Image (cartoon, rainbow, N blue to C red):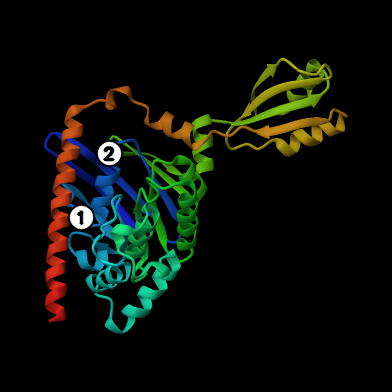
Amino acid sequence: MIEVKNLVKRYGDHLAVDHLSFHVEKGQIYGFLGPNGAGKSTTMNIMTGYIASTEGEVFIDGHNILEDPEGAKKCIGYLPEQPPLYFDMTVGEYMKFAAELKKLPKSERKENVEEVMKLVGIDQMRDRLIKNLSKGYKQRVGLAQAILGYPEIIILDEPTVGLDPKQIIEIRDLIKKLSEKHTVILSSHILSEVSAVCDYIMIINHGKLVASDTTENLSKMTLGSNTLELEIKGTKDKIESLLEKIESIQSMDWKESKEGDISELVIKTDEKEDIREDLFYLMAENKMPIVKMQSTKVSLEDVFLELTEDDSYIENENIDEDEEDTKEAYDMKDTDFKEENIKSSQEEKK
């Protein structure tokens, strides 16, 4: 669905995106992670056509975002971190306006708007002014405009920022529901949310892709091995002599036992090996019950910190200035875009 090839974005001397390449398959939820200033928002803005790249190409369902922007953008629904809302409009007016901007066929607009409003749970708010809505409902309205027209790809930048726990759960459930018919790319700093929702995770740092895999595989990659915590009823010497028969065991780390007849240890094997079944039968045959056998998993937070840790990247005034310049340029372009579309919409009505 999406193919990014050798993408580069420079702001003066600052390299925001550094020869980035990846592809996104259809029908999955992708988590797009990275520390502040890593190039996430810049990459997403290039993918959605808001800003141009310095080098490289982006293809959206076969459409080059620069050569065929209209064809590419028809495939994308985008929710920026700050939803592009008009606060003096009612929810119904705004949704109708968004449908006109997306050039949905007139015969389908009303039905599509009603379906989307019901899907995200704002159909009862149609006559409310957007400025009077809660943060959660404003976010829902922003999400609704992204879904209008049912684009193949939905890109969400920090969709739950500033929401309370109940609202976060509601938006999370909605994202899972959207993945049944859409490919979703989710950028978020809430790593537990990404871990719970996403099928696949991409981590970007210094404008480069440093990891791209499932959560489980990223954990194994960070550990470099499969790790098992064991509690076995028997003596250390007897257990050790039996475990030596399993060739794929790399190391055994013994712990001080809390119970006299129970031996506690941690064993590591190659990341591609799974010895749990062999271990179970070996101990059962020798009448040494396994009281506990648990795989050690690294959290997504641990993986993220290990892959992005770099003290020299935390404080950099030039990067902050570049980001402000980028934000200002983006805001100006977005304002111009809105004004232009308001004029065109008014002319169409006349």
Q: How many marks?
A: 2
C-alpha distance separating marks 2 and 1: 18 Å
Helix, strand or loop at label 2? It is loop
Above or below, 258 relative to 286 = above
Residue at label 2? 207
Residue found at x 13% / y 72%: 344
Label 2–label 1 contact, CB within 8 A: no
Residue 168 in view, yes or no: yes
From the top left corner, tell me how far across and down residue 313 is, in percent: 28, 27
Residue found at x 38% / y 67%: 125
Which of the pair 97/187 is nearer the observer?
A: 97
Helix, strand or loop at label 1? It is loop
Q: Label 1 amino acid? A: Tyr
Of mark 2 and mark 1, the one earlier in the sequence is 1
Residue at label 1? 50
Residue found at x 74% / y 39%: 277
